[in-house]
Image (spheres, rainbow, N blue to C red):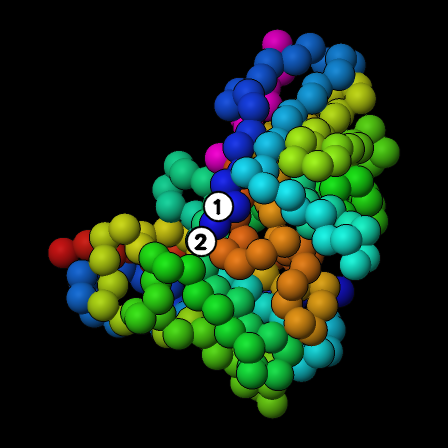
Amino acid sequence: DIVVTQSPDSLAVSLGERATINCKSSQSVFYSSNKKYYLAWYQQKPGQPPKLLIYWASTRESGVPDRFSGSGSGTDFSLTISSLQAEDVAVYYCHQYYSFPNTFGQGTRLEIK
Amino acid sequence: QVQLVESGGGVVQPGRSLRLSCAASGFTFSTYGMHWVRQAPGKGLEWVAVISFSGNTKSLADSVKGRFTISRDNSKNTLYLQMNSLRAEDTAMYYCVKDPYGTADGYFHHWGQGTPVVVSS
């Protein structure tokens, strides 16, 4: 199984500042035939289901604010919020869908400093 | 718009069975793969099961293999999760999730609100 590890476990950032969450996979999630990274990011607010933010490591889902961006290659990826807003307080998960069983990172709790 | 409505959750004793359903609408259900993902109270996300658009390809997490079965009825636009021999560690919110592809090898595009399962004596 591919192990996905996020860092940090929690993060406190001031409003308007940049927040970066990291995700590392235990093996490559790059599929050479289509040159895509099988890595997604989700946001989960209390009492709600997760919401897709980013897929193929860097493609923003329709309707997601452009302050959210995904990047990375190899086995190291990151989610960046360029200017933190109050409504961004949530737990964020990365997810590898390269192989079954699909696996998630343990989650990163993002708070306002 | 895509709607996924789970039902069938509840409180059940260890060793008993439960069947979850997910009613899909707003898209052509028969052309998309589907997943079940669960989340134990206060914990992270765990993928549970996947089924392709036709139902011919299925896969289960090792933690539920031999106890859970995933199936679908495309004529009823409904996804199922049959859960047998339930254990305390199966206690979780169970989410129905739509894949963007029929082969069900994509990301988790749309999520239902979830149905809670509590396994307790």
Which residue does the image show at 31% across and 52% down from the upper left? B91
Please report contact status of discs 2 and 1: CB closer than 8 Å, yes or no.
yes
Residue B109 is one of the magenta-drawn residues: no
Query: Badge 2: few (under 14), some or many (20 or more) residues near its Cα, within 10 Å?
Result: many
Count of marks placed on residues:
2
Q: Nearer the viewer, residue A74 or B3?
A: A74
Which residue does the image show at 37% across and 59% down from the upper left? B62
Question: For mark 1, what is the residue?
Answer: B45
Q: Position of residue A6 (x, y in %)?
A: 56, 29
Q: Which image quarter: residue A8?
A: top right
Is the stretch drawn in magenta largely helix, strand or loop? strand
Kind of residue at disc 2: Arg
Most distant residue in the bottom direction: B75
Magenta segment range?
Answer: A106-113
- Asked if residue B86 lies left or right of residue B48, the reply is left
Q: Are marks 2 and 1 on the same chain?
A: yes
Which residue does the image show at 42% across and 71% down from the upper left? B81
Q: Position of residue B46 (x, y in %)?
A: 46, 50
